[in-house]
Amino acid sequence: MTRPLYHLGRFCSRHHWPVIGLWAVVAVVVVVAAQSAGERYSDNLSLPGTDSTNATNLLQDKLPQQAYGTNPVVLQAKSGTLTDAKNKPAVQNTVASLNKVKHVIKTVDPTSSAGASFLSKDKTIGYIPATLDVGPSDLTVKQAQAVSDGADPGRTAGLKVATGGYVGQKLSSPPPRAARRSGSRRRS
């Protein structure tokens, strides 16, 4: 084995420029092949027979409105509290706007008595739990953006707004390769 490696090494040192060129070509071919293979991933993980999968299936069958949990739309007052006369209408308008978004089936107003537990102690931060009828693996970026856009009344009124849960994850995940090239993705 030593003799063939010795000859290979001698050949490479005597013909270093063609060898370097060949390695550059091989590197380019590997990169192009990897790029053309594309990204193949899925965030739809289910393990049949596990308690988690059984619970999810049971919720989807018996309680579809609660199957996917909630996605918090977090609001922060830059001045005052969310319950004061200046900010409360903005919170209520945001809740009403979110209720009009397709796939949003339920929200809770944090300034209402039912949503009081969704406010911080100083009432400057609160969140609107938004329940959707689509799960994380079925939600598209366009649908997630529509939910985020549903919070625009709060943004317009001067509240700081952020979206969490799987809606927020969908908006913050890197766009598919085609969307990156075209620059067609909007972030909030």
Image (cartoon, rainbow, N blue to C red):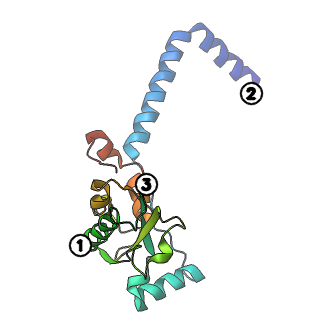
Q: In which quarter of the image is residue 156?
A: bottom left
Q: In which quarter of the image is residue 163?
A: bottom left
Residue beneath disc 1: 100
Q: Can residue 165 be seen in this view?
A: no
Camera-near label (2 vs 1) is 1
Residue beneath disc 3: 40
As shown in the figure, which amino acid type bears the numbered disc 1?
Lys
Tag on residue 127? none
> Are the residues flagged by discs 2 and 1 in contact, CB closer than 8 Å?
no
- What is the distance, in whole Å, between disc 2 and disc 1 at their CAs? 74 Å
Considering only vertical position in the picture, is 65 above or below 123? below
* SS under mark 3: loop
As shown in the figure, which amino acid type bears the numbered disc 2?
Met
In the rendered image, residue 81, in percent from the top left (x then y), is placed at 43, 62
As shown in the figure, which amino acid type bears the numbered disc 3?
Arg
- What is the distance, in whole Å, between disc 3 and disc 2 at their CAs? 40 Å
Q: Nearer the viewer, residue 106 or 9?
A: 106
Report the residue that reaches farthest toward the front: 85
Camera-near label (3 vs 2) is 3
In the rendered image, residue 80, in percent from the top left (x then y), is placed at 42, 58
Q: Residues within 10 Å of mark 1 (few under 14, many from 20)?
A: few
Residue beneath disc 2: 1
* SS under mark 2: loop
Considering only vertical position in the picture, is 65 above or below 35? below
Camera-near label (3 vs 1) is 1
Q: State which tag comes first along the sequence, 3 or 2.
A: 2
